[in-house]
Amino acid sequence: MNEILIEVGEYYSDKLAQHGETPNGVDWNSLDSQWLRFDQLTKIIRNKREFSLNDLGCGYGALLDYLNPRYPNFSYSGCDVSANMIQAAKNRYASNQNALFYESSMPPNIAEYTIASGIFNVRLGRSDAEWQQHIKATLDVLNKHSRHGFAFNCLTSYSDAEKMRNDLYYANPCEIFDLCKRRYSFNVALLHDYGLYEFTILVRKQVGNV
């Protein structure tokens, strides 16, 4: 595991220790905003009857809380670089046989969809150039492990300047859209209209294009 991922894992383990299995424990402000993000990210899912999904940066498994009452039949693999987060998720969903959790920076298998929520926000002391390279490498992981498409979010560079923090990374949505359009698929959606200081990208693949 590289130094960036080690730093991020330690950061989120500390958040979990402070706030427990709550939105604050994964550095979100509220359950409402966390669910609103999931509303956007899960727009990638087209086959709602049965599908497989990877959750990269799963934390304690909050996305699974969102999915369970909405989708009757799916298999789920959650990955996180924080060992404490993974242990919390395993304890939380010990009785769910369709949910597996891995301490890892990438999923173990290809799924129909991969979702990543909030993993590009906390750059700590890394420079723009370092973090941009990290984002590009991670998007390659999302693409490689997704059969039908993937979705992720980023804080937006259109945020109010006085509210922006030096330890967070605010991406240019136009640049990220262009990158995904040129590198991964002709079918890319940019969602920047849901009231948060962020945006969501949906990358849809042609069937059979792994």
Image (cartoon, helix red, strand yellow):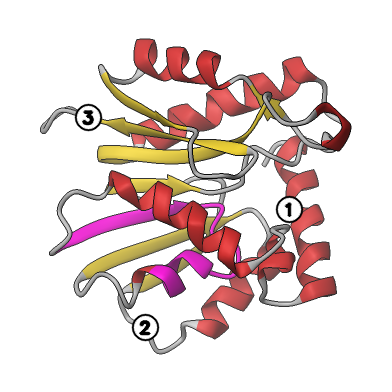
Residue ID at (73%, 57%): 27
Q: Amino acid at mark 2?
A: Asn
Residue ID at (80%, 64%): 15
Q: CA distance from mark 3 to mark 2?
A: 29 Å
Q: Earlier in the sequence, mark 3 or mark 1?
A: 1
Q: CA distance from mark 2 to mark 1?
A: 25 Å
Q: Quadrant of the N terminus?
A: top right
The location of residue 155, given as percent across then percent down, is: 65, 35
The location of residue 131, given as percent across then percent down, is: 71, 25
Dot 3: element: loop
- Residue 107 in sight: no
Q: Is residue 207 left or right of residue 20?
A: left
Q: Earlier in the sequence, mark 2 or mark 1?
A: 1
Region of the chain picked out in magenta, as a range: 50-66
The location of residue 31, given as percent across then percent down, is: 60, 69
Q: Is residue 139 left or right of residue 18?
A: left
Q: Depth check: 35 or 21 in front?
A: 35
Quarter location, residue 202 = top left
Mark 3 vs mark 1: give the one in front. 3
Q: Which residue is mark 1?
A: 9
Q: Which residue is mark 3?
A: 205
Quarter location, residue 178 = top left
In the rendered structure, are the residues bearing label 3 and label 1 in contact, judged by CB atoms less than 8 Å apart? Answer: no
Residue ID at (88%, 32%): 162
Instruction: Give yes or no for residue 19 being in the magenta stretch.
Output: no
Q: Is residue 209 left or right of residue 94?
A: left
